[in-house]
Amino acid sequence: MGQEEDVNLFVQWRHATATKWQYCPLCREVLRDQDWDGKSRRYCAQCGFVYWERPLPAVAAVVYDAPSDQVLLVTRKYPPQVGGYTFPGGGVEAGESLTAAVMREVLEETGVVVEVEMLLGTWSTPNNETIITFYRAHLVGGTLVAGSDAVSVNWFPRVQVPRLAFSVHQEVMRLFYHSIELQQMEKSR
Ligand SMILES: [Zn+2]
């Protein structure tokens, strides 16, 4: 599959929300809009199925290698912000904890194995379609190789991290710097 087709598929997936569903996924009856709790939702009059549309849970990690004082960043392959720098991350799978999801996503996108150290925070994306939880994680192994979602993956010196593609990631970066400074202050006491 060419990269252009790849991108189109991805864009379609992003916008294939259930508000556009035509048929019931359980009994194949035609769905209609009905008011539930003051909001219009897709509803099946035959079997009672209601689609409760919710934001997607996602995770991302600031991967830090303390010995080399470097941070791992992904160069984005897909919209939005193609070519921009972000932290590795992605969607949480059903049956998976947030920390298991972030370790799996980092491995898939960058090839490195990490351990989660601490929670940095949770944010909604500007369109409120996704809720992202950010962790700080440290390198424990693996081999650096870009996954299918990334143009490339690279280590950057902590004090020379380039501008990140999303304002939330910039905010997370500030929290990460703060967490490192706190640790350094505690050590020097
Ligand atoms: Zn139905």
Image (tube, rainbow, N blue to C red):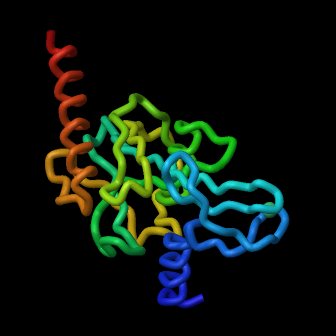
Vertical side of 33 occupied by 112: above or below: above
x and y percent of residue 53 in the render?
56, 55
Q: Is residue 136 left or right of residue 24?
A: left
Q: Is residue 101 left or right of residue 47?
A: left
Of all residues shown, which one is farthest toward the top? 189
* Residue at (50, 84) in percent of width and height: 8
Q: Nearer the viewer, residue 168 or 152?
A: 168
The quarter of the image holding the N terminus is: bottom right
Quadrant of ligand 1: it is bottom right
x and y percent of residue 43 in the render?
68, 60
Q: Nearer the viewer, residue 137 or 102?
A: 102
Vertical side of 26 occupied by 102: above or below: above
Number of numbered discs visible in the structure rendering = 0
Q: Nearer the viewer, residue 177 or 32?
A: 32
Residue 143 shows in the view: no
Residue 142 shows in the view: yes
* Residue at (40, 45) in percent of width and height: 61
* Residue at (25, 54) in percent of width and height: 156
x and y percent of residue 160 in the render?
15, 52
Q: Is residue 86 left or right of residue 175?
A: right
x and y percent of residue 68 in the render?
28, 42
Q: Is residue 32 left or right of residue 157?
A: right
Q: Nearer the viewer, residue 40 or 27?
A: 40
Vertical side of 119 occupied by 130: above or below: below
* Residue at (15, 9) in percent of width and height: 189
